[in-house]
Image (spheres, rainbow, N blue to C red):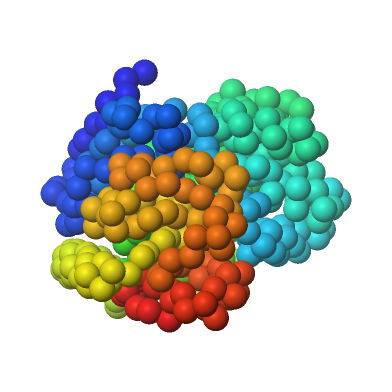
Amino acid sequence: MTNDPHRRKTCRYCETALGEPFLDLGSQPLANNLPRKEDIVKTEFHCPLAVVKCPKCHLVQLTHSVPAHLMFDEYLYVSSTTQTFRTHFAEYAGDVRERLLKKDRPLAVDIGSNDGLLVSCYDKAGMRGVGVEPAKNLAADANKRGVITFNRYFDEATVREITAKYGKADAISANNVFAHIDDIQSVVRNVRELLSDDGFFVIEFAYLVTMLEKMFFDMIYHEHVCYIGITALGFLMERFEMEIFDITEQGTHGGSLRVFMQKKGGPYPRAAIVDRFLREEKEKGCLDVRTYQDFASRVMGFKEKLNGMVAALKQQEKTISGYGAPAKASTIINFCELTPREIDYIVDDNPLKQGRLIPGRKIPIVTSAYLGEHPTDYVLIFAWNFAKEIILKIEPLRARGVKFIIPLPEPKTV
């Protein structure tokens, strides 16, 4: 398989011809491919990071595709790292189980199951959990802990094997994964094949409207190929004779949606909230290209503000560190061209990331203990969606005069 990215000429959902991007964040490295210190001189893979809106189904998507194996064969993001997500997935599994109360030990399959956190929550909720995870390191770890996980992509062969071993699925989930899949039509086709006629498909994703309104442009990175609204998702489901029947709003990633879908004519009634979201997306200008042009203008303004703040602090001889090395940190750091001259180091609580470097800019990633021993004047919280949890954890530093910077929706000191 080639390692070269390719420019998408047609929409991932409806195959309509795509025009020019409304926002270009430059050529960037892969956000979760964190180099080791010994690889500091090696050339990194870079790819254009730009977004375009489909004129027909209104899906917002990346202009370029990166071969999946470059991003997912080894993966350093681990769901279980934060208490926030451990609590969230336990609630998620409870929601799924509640909708399947009439079934005894229903089968729940999780696509892109990561370290098996949600699958283990399915098991605890009285379901038969099965994970599908392409990252070798994460799948191996999950299986070692007794969480049933297929180390492969969600393809036709996987569907056949799961069906042969466990039967049709009563629930299939793709939590913060659906937006990462380039060949999404094949996945929906495979979901439909594995799903029982009275089952449902549930996905969770960072919501397009939240990104636009709160200026969360840092959720744009190469893994995240689509930025989903209900209008576009409904269009895709219609193509595969499926339908959206319910939506719940979630606080994760600054504002996400959990969307439930079934085969057309399935047993679940369509909730009024579905039509409310469709109506609101139209009213808020999500079908109008001018909305996206305005968003792009604000993103450029953000770069000017953050770089201005950092430059002013460095002029005052202040030191700055970062907290959190999620994919969103790489987007901001590379877009704003920050280097170790501006950011001394970045703390991350995930042991898999510690000792590595931010891609592209080579800022070192360290433990929270390092921050305690080498405090800086300011801590820029790149994992802003966990800001409360992070500030509480390092609260003693405030007494030592350390201040915190939250970058989005716009840079501010707290």
* Coordinates of residue 241 in the picture (x, y in percent): 48, 47
Q: Is residue 225 above or below residue 252?
A: above
The residue at 56%/32% (across/down) is 135
Q: Quadrant of residue 389?
A: bottom right
Q: Please tell me which residue lies in front, 372 or 10.
A: 372
Q: Can the viewer see residue 203?
A: no
Seen at 28% across and 54% down, the residue is 341
Give the residue at x 56% y 31%: 134
Residue 44 appears in which quarter of the rendering? top left
Q: Residue at x 84, y 48 (%)?
A: 105
- Whether residue 286 appears in this view of the structure is yes
| Left or right for 49, reference 364 | left
| Picture coordinates of residue 60, whole percent (x, y) | 30, 55
Q: Horizontally, is 119 left or right of 146 in the view?
A: left
The total number of labels drawn is 0
x, y percent for residue 14: 31, 45
Q: Position of residue 379 (x, y in %)?
A: 43, 67
Image position of 151 with respect to 291: above or below: above
Say if 123 sits above or below 228 in the image.
above
Q: Is residue 29 left or right of residue 260?
A: left
- The reply, left or right, for residue 385 in relation to residue 144 is left
Quadrant of the rendered image containing residue 288:
bottom left
In the rendered image, which quarter contains the N terminus? top left
